[in-house]
Image: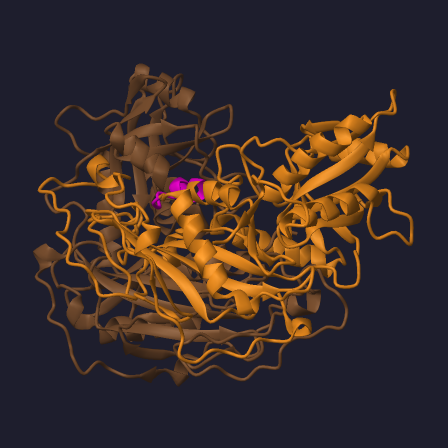
Chain colours: A orange, B brown
Amino acid sequence: MRAFAPRCASLAARSTHISRPLLQRPWHTARRCYSIKPEAASTSIPQDVDASKLVVETTKAPSQRRPNEELIFGQTFTDHMLTIEWNKNTGWTDPKITPYQNLSLDPATSVFHYAFCAFEGMKAYKDSKGQIRLFRPDKNMERFNQSSARIALPTFSSTAMIELISKFAKLEERFIPTEHGYSLYLRPTIIGTQKTLGVGPPGSALLYVIASPVGPYYPTGFKAISLEATDYAVRAWPGGVGDKKLGANYAPCIVPQRDAASRGFQQNLWLFGEEEYVTEVGTMNMFVALKDKTTGQKELVTAPLDGTILTGVTRDSILSLAREKLAPEGWKISERKYTMTELAEASAEGRLLEAFGSGTAAIVAPVRSISWKGKLVDCGLTEHEESGEIALKMKGWIEARQYGEEEHEWSHVCE
Amino acid sequence: MRAFAPRCASLAARSTHISRPLLQRPWHTARRCYSIKPEAASTSIPQDVDASKLVVETTKAPSQRRPNEELIFGQTFTDHMLTIEWNKNTGWTDPKITPYQNLSLDPATSVFHYAFCAFEGMKAYKDSKGQIRLFRPDKNMERFNQSSARIALPTFSSTAMIELISKFAKLEERFIPTEHGYSLYLRPTIIGTQKTLGVGPPGSALLYVIASPVGPYYPTGFKAISLEATDYAVRAWPGGVGDKKLGANYAPCIVPQRDAASRGFQQNLWLFGEEEYVTEVGTMNMFVALKDKTTGQKELVTAPLDGTILTGVTRDSILSLAREKLAPEGWKISERKYTMTELAEASAEGRLLEAFGSGTAAIVAPVRSISWKGKLVDCGLTEHEESGEIALKMKGWIEARQYGEEEHEWSHVCE
């Protein structure tokens, strides 16, 4: 086997270096082994995350909060972080909020070698009464668990994790600007921390949450982007992990993104297969609004969750809102496969009404045009328009629920 | 965009925390940006790796070397590590050998979120004269550069890196057992160290090499493995990164590996497509020896380097040796696509002579059987055989060159 295959994969749990290692009895076997033993691959969780055991150590040196206009996505962080360690024998340790600090990890730690990393992106908002709110955190935690399990990392109670993230967001309240459009971006992350090079399920992991205050994605109003339809590089594949929020889905997309940028396009439009199915745009889900050739019926379309499409929370919110508010107006709401050829034809016939990406950071990102086979496919905006009608409406509807202007079950008030 | 897309991706280089951060002028732009700017994505390297500038700081507390029989792959490491930092403005810093130590990294570091990690696996051997030898290090460094570039991490001079790794291996000489079959496994690794959450090319990176003394893969002789043909999960695909040694190729394969193990199979045999092409086995390349149905000619077959197959150094060595030593005996040596159906048919007709995986750790791993569609495809070994003839010969031929018993250009003596 290649050298990283375990000669005899000891899966003894290892603790990270941010706390005192626990003494573990190494997993031994008298028999020669060439791979992972089933009994070592157990995913049982002796101790689930227990939010009631949270220990909080606040910083002695609070930082100065940056002025709103200096906030840049993911560049500055709050004073604290939430951490919970896991190992396969004892399960999750007591959660801790500590001052924001470096992670000290052995250079053999599995996240550095085999990409044992998954994450989430979510935001905390301050409403007009000063309450802190999360937006559909249950959806994020559901996906976080799915992502973690897909790479043999542990799962946890969503309810406990939402409680902990709520407490963390409240502790960092002073970093959340009161101005509309501002929020606290939260980045739950899980990494494999086993410090051996054998390729197998990590015996230990670290889950942590850091937070970055962010401003509105479009401070001066929408700015439509142009895309390059990308077929030479493929983001995801059936039987792969494109529907999970794994680190492994990101690094391989950077060079195609850089190449598209060098040709003047802000993002890749990821195509799939000979049929050139439209899948995602950059790191967003993709929506198009079409008018039917025969009936003239309007249709809002996004790719179906076939295993190659990230299960976006904003995607799901847009579909729900469309079914609630657009369907009664006669719109057809479709999760179906669609191709570049279909888009180009609709565009040429004036039936491509608009196109936009969707994701947590921007909510919606309107698309002006798509470069495909040497031509520009126009996505329905006039020269002076920076957004279509549906993208604009969606942003408004979603923000109303995020900021608690419309009371809705999607908004979770942090206690 | 989803929350991790840069609101305005500042690609200001960040240094890691293992040395004092350099002051950088952040990259600013007045224009709104939604993605990576071409000028920020430059891969120019102001300063290449300079082996002559190596600084060595040896440990004050040398560890006790473990007895040979206690050596387990990738579990214990030598006293030192080799590190070189990079940032996009100044290039590579002076290389350092320091005591083996933890990496201290900001929790926002890009390797934890987006899998900016690539690695190599290679070994240092001690020959009968006590000289330290590397095996085809030029091939490893060529692939390491390709892997690194594929995820927008920096490249470097292969020659300089081989010189540095040679010095490192010589410094750790006491950890390399003199007994045949033992060696020092070397793990060159590169990680993206930019400590911001914007998705883009990391502005800084850390390359490091750690070393683990290892024993023979088969201390008591070969032990053939059984495989589960896997079609529900897909390791690699056209337009993906399966031919590069990226962390991203490993974590997603662990759950299928665990599942195969739970059914009693040591490794996955990764199939691709409706045709069920045979691609790789676990983390190894795959070889089969077949007898032609009509002519009876013997053929050694492995999958071609079509972008989904790792460019294994052992794979390349086996092909070279086969062309050198087997072709004159009438063998046909083929890099071509082959399917599970073809293997099953050959097996049923007694024409599947043997099958084996190939990689740095084991050199060859003979295969007894493959579970496929509810039946076991026999791979040509009799009940008491643990290896076929070709696998055995290959191991001998390669080891002769690794340990310098046969002087050959593949063996690099460390100066």
Residue at left 72%, top 44%?
Answer: A397
Q: Position of residue B208 (x, y in %)?
A: 37, 69
Residue at left 60%, top 68%?
Answer: B43
In front of the other: A357 or B56: A357
- Relative vertical location of residue A77 with respect to residue B143 in this rendering, above or below: below
Q: Position of residue A211 (x, y in %)?
A: 51, 63
Image quarter where the N terminus of chain A lies is top left
- Relative vertical location of residue B401 with respect to residue B377 in this rendering, above or below: below
In front of the other: B231 or B397: B231
In front of the other: B332 or B57: B57
Left or right, B212 with respect to B254, comes to left
Residue at left 37%, top 17%?
Answer: B345
Q: Is residue A148 magenta?
A: yes
Q: Position of residue B269 (x, y in %)?
A: 36, 32
Left or right, A290 with respect to A26, comes to right
Q: In the rendered image, is residue B84 in sight? A: yes
In front of the other: B144 or B210: B210
Q: Position of residue B31 (x, y in %)?
A: 77, 68
Residue range of the region highlighted in magenta in the rendering: A146-154
- Relative vertical location of residue A306 with respect to residue B409 in this rendering, above or below: above
- Relative vertical location of residue A305 with respect to residue B250 in this rendering, above or below: above
Q: Is residue A8 magenta?
A: no
Task: Report which quarter residue B16 is drawn in.
Answer: bottom left
